[in-house]
Amino acid sequence: MKFETDYIEKLAKIIKEQDLTEISLEDGEQAITLRKEVIVSSTPSAAVAAPATISAVAPTSAPIVAPVEEAKEEKKSGTPITSPMVGTFYMAPSPDSAPFVSVGGSVKQGDVVCIIEAMKMMNEIKSEITGKVVEICVEDGQPVEFGQVLMYVE
């Protein structure tokens, strides 16, 4: 997959709308990172965002790995449910509704476990396994990245 200009512009728009500082995507042997630099001035309330910078990584034969994060995740018990996209994590369908899941609760394959809001679209995230929720790693309303562990089920 070649990263097209329209696709890159959409990613830059997500950075701006979601108030993110960086998006990194990997597709097989290609990778792209968009980064927004924040410049803080000496005035206490003034922060200026510089335009997004784009750095594309040439195809590589080995995937980029963050060993410290992987080591932490391996120590957790259970199977991770990860975010399929960049967005905002919600535990319930609305602020006054009960959460989809809670620690100690059980889930079946296909059950909705949370919602990720991306580009003003609410995306239901479903469990791919049946089991008991042993840990929820993200707080309600927190931004999440692609591939970030949301919860563990065993």
Image (spheres, grey):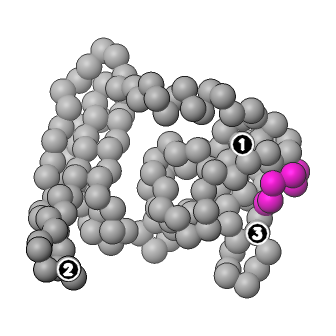
Identify the disc placed on residue 152.
1
Q: Which residues are magenta?
A: 101-107
Image marks 3 and 1: residues in contact by CB distance under 8 Å: no
57 vs 5, nearest the viewer = 57
Residue found at x 44% / y 55%: 86
69 vs 8, nearest the viewer = 69
Identify the disc placed on residue 79.
none
Question: Mark 1 vs mark 2: which is more N-terminal?
Answer: 2
What's the CA distance linking mark 3 and mark 1?
Answer: 16 Å
Kind of element beneath mark 3? loop
Q: Quadrant of the N terminus?
A: top left
Badge 1 amino acid: Tyr
Residue found at x 37% / y 68%: 18
Image marks 1 and 2: residues in contact by CB distance under 8 Å: no
- x, y percentage for residue 20? 33, 62
For disc 2, the marked residue is: 44
- x, y percentage for residue 15? 30, 62
Q: Does residue 82 appear left or right of residue 28 in this picture? A: right
Magenta residue check for 3 = no
Kind of element beneath mark 2? loop
Kind of element beneath mark 1? strand
- x, y percentage for residue 90? 62, 67
- Magenta segment's dominant SS is loop
For disc 3, the marked residue is: 99
Question: Mark 3 vs mark 1: which is more N-terminal?
Answer: 3
104 vs 55, nearest the viewer = 104
Residue found at x 87% / y 54%: 105
- In the figure, residue 119 lies in which quadrant? bottom left
